Image (cartoon, rainbow, N blue to C red):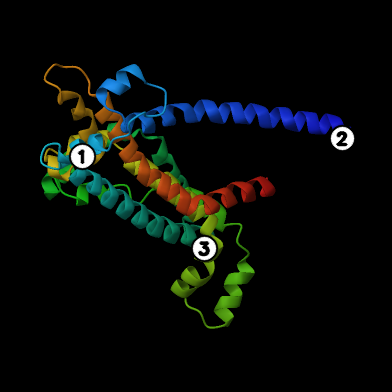
Amino acid sequence: MDRKVKLSTGIIHLVLIVFCLILAYPIFVMVAGAFKTAQELSSNVAGFPINPTLDNFSRLFNYNSGLVLRTYFNSIFVSASYTLLTVIISSLAAFAFAKYKFKGKNVLFIMLLITMMIPTELNITPLYLLFSKLGWLNTYKVQIIPGIANVFCLFLLRQYMVTIPDSLIEAARIDGAKDLRIFFKVIIPVSVPSIGALAILQFLTKWNEILFPKIMLTKQDLMPIMLILPTLNELDSARSVPWELVLAGCTLVTIPLVIVFLIFQNKFLSSVTMGAVKG
């Protein structure tokens, strides 16, 4: 029996290793290609760079008077601000729905969940007209504020906070803690795994967003980098795609995502394993 278990475990590990290598291969090609010249990339697509160079990144940063670097920091600022505000507002709302009793709570919660069934694309036109009237077009506000009251985040955190024992809150109240202190000192520390997972998902979603900023922004200085990267194809007057610059840009935009995952990975994995244990 032990041999069968070890054999099956070894097969599973082998299959996982193969899948990991398959998934990692395009990432390797991207990162390696970012350090190759155009000539080397055409003759050595999938191998390690023979003569590594940083010239691609230098050309990228100097593109259109530093537009790539400016929009890169735009994306970092917008995504970080959006994620922080979303986590704060969603966790406060989730705490109210999970631990407070008020009239119409269940009906209101169901109505909020129904809004998740409406595709975002259907709201683009009325939102554009609304933000045009407010004077928010071509601003950071239009990139950050819409969507911070996120129903999906509310639902995710509410489902987690429901499992927190009420005895913890009652004990805090006996010690004289007010609602906000209970929230920050009791609820938030216990909910860190779900908040970590939420932070990764929301940062990733905002970082990769294209449709909404493409419609709401016309000034390049305010755009996220995801709207500028496709314009790298226009750099070459001969109309051949400068793949070395495209790969350098793709490598550049991947770095913040890796950093965010490394920061919150323990919390993210904890939320997954805790959900498995509860299941």
Quadrant including the C terminus: top right
Q: Quadrant of residue 226?
A: top left
- Residue 197, placed above or below residue 53: below
Task: Locate the N terminus by quadrant.
Answer: top right
For the image, the number of numbered tags is 3
Would you name the residue on which mark 1 appears? 58
Mark 3 falls on what kind of element? loop
Between the C-alphas of marks 2 and 3, the distance is 53 Å
Can I make out residue 151 in this image?
A: no
Residue at image coords 45%, 43%: 113
Mark 3: few/some/many CA within 10 Å (<14, 14-19, 20+): few
Give neighbour class at mark 1: few <14, some 14-19, many 20+ (Cα, 10 Å): few
> Along the line of sight, which residue is nearer the eye, 263 or 26?
26
Q: Residues within 10 Å of mark 2 (few under 14, many from 20)?
A: few
Q: Indicate which disc, 3 or 1, sits on the residue closer to the N terminus.
A: 1
**Label 2 or label 1, whichever comes before in sequence order:** 2
Identified by mark 1, the residue type is: Ser
Cα distance in 3D space between marks 3 and 1:
58 Å
Residue at horizontal 60 percent and vertical 61 percent from the top: 164
Residue at image mark 2:
2
Side of 122 relative to 239 (left or right): right
Of pointers 2 and 3, the one earlier in the residue sequence? 2
Question: Which residue is depicted at the point 43% across and 51% down?
Answer: 199
Amino acid at circle 3: Lys
Question: Which numbered circle lies on residue 101?
Answer: 3
- Give the amino acid at mark 2: Asp
Residue under the image location 18 percent in, 29 percent down: 231
Residue 32 image offset from top left, x and y in percent: 38, 31
Toward the viewer: 199 or 19?
Answer: 19
